[in-house]
Structures are given as structure tokens and as C-alpha cells.
Amino acid sequence: MSNKLRATLSFSVMAVLLLIVGQSQSWPLMLTILNLCLISSIMALGVNIQWGYAGLFNVGTMGFAALGGVAAMLVSKAPIPEAWAAGGSNLFIGAVLFLLTIGACVAAYRKLPEGSLRVIAISAIILIGIFATRYFSDTAIADIEAVNPALTGYLGGLGLPILFSWVAGGLLAAGGAWIVGKIALGLRSDYLAIATLGISEIIIAVLKNEDWLTRGVKNVAGLPRPVPYEIDLQKSDAFISWVEWLNSSALEGLSSAGRGDLLSDMVIEQSGIFVKLCYAGLFTTVLLIILSMSVMALNSPWGRMMRAIRDNEVSAAAMGKNITGRHLQVFVIGSAVVGIAGAMLTTLDGQLTPAAYNPLRFTFLIWVMVIVGGSGNNLGSVLGGFLIWFIWIEAEPVGVWLMDYGTSWMDDGNPVRLHLMDSAQHMRLFMMGMVLLLVMRFNPGGILPEVTKPGLNK
């Protein structure tokens, strides 16, 4: 079966599954799953750029998604004037001293000859710089966090439209990836995985503990939306008229009181659906843009060069290719895509929750999406994002139904039945493992495996 036919069948099955959820459970739930599938697919594309194109084993996806989420908050939230007045000046001085310390260390390293004198000088500069920086920054942080800590206690952001944060999230994640890549990309693949996982944990630890920047575990709620609010739609005469026209057959023949109550319920329900559809439109647009750019890049001479480096670094280096430089390039690009998805997810949630970032959701689940969908195939990563996230969400209710049906012949108080019903939520992990094992056993290349012939790897 060709990849094109397999892709058509696979996405058709996914569409049917989503329609079944909408029909049997609820349409708002179906749209929520769809939006999260779209965001997960973008994250999977970012990981596929790194692993499928260049063979980089990055296990720090969580950190770059978190940087995208931070960007959403820093761009969209309004600044807190009281916090800036309390500690802004000292924080600025601390930042300047920190940069001066780095500059002095670089200058000493370059100017002084190799030996004990250079080691002593750099050590002294670092020690003095740390004490001077902490003197101002610690005072600033304490003053900032003391400003109404129950509601604010942080600096806030720029107060710009949150759509700008999607670009900012990509840039912030790309900047972080450049720093990480400069440190870790010279390592062997297994060491690279350990290093990126450790660095991502450091990023999350900073977000959880630096209250002056992100409010830590107290979270930052109330991020502005790029789409209308439900309450505004419910007060809009135009939206009410549209809902009334759309449901005219159901409202026909009812009394004025009954018609008004039913119309009110419809407006409330369909305002939520409309908002989710708006999000779906935005996320689909971003996904299509990134997917089309990924396809063009993979089928270009640059993409063929990256696959050559991935398959045989020694031969590529013999042909004059800068392996480390190309790895850094693709590492930054893939992380930027993950950062965009992280900013989109925070936008959808409406709040920044640093404690919610965990490796299972934001690293290993994304890797399963890439592996199951098809490593090295862009459409495969998108399919994996849809399929794996759908299974992740629906495995639990399906597991509850299976346990209930399978033990229906037992008494309600039977301890075996009670134990199985209490354990139904673990079907999620069981189903994920089964899907991964089955795909790896019967189709090791994924559902949509990589096709190396130019023009077909889509």
C-alpha cells in the first residue's frame, strides 16, 4: 500500500473517530480533543525535525514547550507598575552586573595566557560577580514578590496581543536551544539525551521557583484570548440571531416562554462550540504553515543533506559538511516549533501552570507520537499527534466502559469488580503501551514510514 493511500485511510479513520466522540459524548469534548490534537501534532513535527531529519535524540522537549508557555504570559499579561517600582531598578542593576561578569570572564579567557593565572583571574571574577549580582537581584526579587503576593507578586508582561506570543515563544525556545546546543551537541547521542532531559528539568525548576517572573506554583491565570469570550457572544444580538436562524426548525411551534428558554440554552452551548471552532481554525492554520514548510525543507537539498548526515556522519564530514553546525541548526529549528506549540497550548488553557509540565506529557508522549506516526515523515508526525492524543484522552472512559461491561455479571459490592473499576484509569497507560508495541512489531517504520524518494516524503 502506498504512503498516499495509507495516509488517506488513516486520516479518514481519525475523522470518523472524532465524529463518533462528538455524536456519542459531546461536540464540545470532540472540539477540545481536536484542538489538543492539533497542538500535539505541531510539537511532534518539532521533534521529527530533530530526530527524523538529523537523528538528534532530544529528550528535553518539555523545557522548550515550557519556554513557549512563558512567552505567552510575558507577552500578553499587562505589566505590574507597583512591582516594577519596587524592584525594577535593582533588578536592572543585577542584570547589568551579570552581563559584565560574563564579559569579563570572556575577556580574561582570551587575553590571559593559559595557566594558573587565568584560572585564578576567572575564578575571582566569577566570585565577585556572583556576590555583586546577588546583592542587587535578591533585594529586587524580595521587593517584587512582596507586592500583593496573593494576586500579583511578579513583574507581569508586555500587555501585547497574545497572538504575538506564538512567534515570541518560538524565538525564546530557539534562543534556549542555541545555548543548550552549544553545550550539549558535541556529546554522544545517549549523553545528549541525558543532558537535554536534565536541562529541561532545570528550566521547569526555575519556572516553579522564580515567583517574581512566573508566580511559580501560584500560576498566572486570566491570559487574554485571541478569540471571543463566550459571555460576550451570549450578549451579542448578532450571535443570538444566528443561533436562532440555525436552529429554526427545533424552535418552531414552541410557546414564547419555551422558545426563549430553549434558545437561551442553545446560545450558551453553541457559544462554547463557536469559541472552540475559532481556536481550531487558528491552530489548523499554524499547523498547515509549519507542515508545508517542513515538507519543502525535507525535499530540498538542505533536507537531503540532513538525512545524509543522519545516516552516515563520517561520509558527510568527508564531503566537507559541518556536522556540529548543521546539528545546531536543526536543533534550534525543531525547538522553535515546539516553543510555538507551547505558546499555543498556554493560550488555549488561558493560564500558565509551571507545575503542569512533566516529562510524560511533554516529552515521552510526543516521542510516541513521532515513532507511531512515522519518524522522518511529516504527515506521519501529524497523524501520530492525532492518534496518540486521541487514545490518551479516550482510553480512560473506554476503559471504564470495558470494566463495567466485563464485570456486569458480578454483584455491585464484589471486591473484584470494585478493584477493576477503581483501576480502569490505568487503561490509558496499558493502551499506549499496546499501540506502541503493535506498531513496532508489525510496522517498525511507523504507520506512515519515511520515503526517501524526492517528492514522496510528505
Image (cartoon, rainbow, N blue to C red):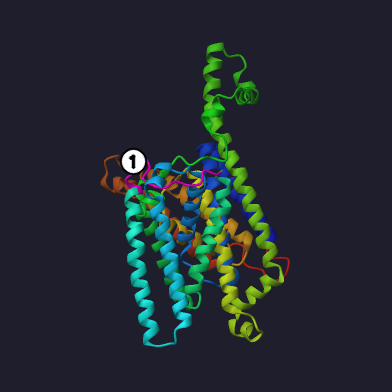
Q: Position of residue 35 (x, y in %)?
A: 55, 46
Q: Secondary structure at mark 1?
A: loop
Indicate the quadrant containing the N terminus: top left, top right, bottom left or bottom right.
Answer: bottom right
Residue 171: quadrant of the picture: bottom right
In the rendered structure, which segment of residues is drawn in magenta?
144-160
Residue 332: quadrant of the picture: bottom right
Q: Position of residue 164 (x, y in %)?
A: 58, 48
Three-letter code, disc 1: Asn
Left/right of residue 412 with respect to residue 243 in the rendered view: left
Residue sticking out furthest to the right: 455
Q: Position of residue 79 (x, y in %)?
A: 46, 44
Q: Nearer the viewer, residue 390 or 358?
A: 358
Q: What residue sits right under mark 1 in the picture?
A: 148
Q: Nearer the viewer, residue 259 or 298?
A: 298
Residue at image location 48% in from the left, 69% down from the top = 180
Looking at the image, can residue 242 be seen? yes
Q: Is residue 42 magenta?
A: no
What is the total number of numbered labels drawn onto the structure image? Answer: 1
Q: Is residue 145 magenta?
A: yes
- Chief SS of the magenta region: loop
Indicate the quadrant containing the C terminus: top left, top right, bottom left or bottom right.
Answer: bottom right
Residue at image location 48% in from the left, 62% down from the top = 61
Q: Residues within 10 Å of mark 1 (few under 14, many from 20)?
A: few
Left/right of residue 199 with respect to residue 31 in the rendered view: left
Q: Nearer the viewer, residue 390 or 177?
A: 177
Residue at image location 36% in from the left, 54% down from the top = 210
Residue at image location 47% in from the left, 76% down from the top = 107
Looking at the image, can residue 356 be seen? no
Q: Position of residue 49 (x, y in %)?
A: 59, 65
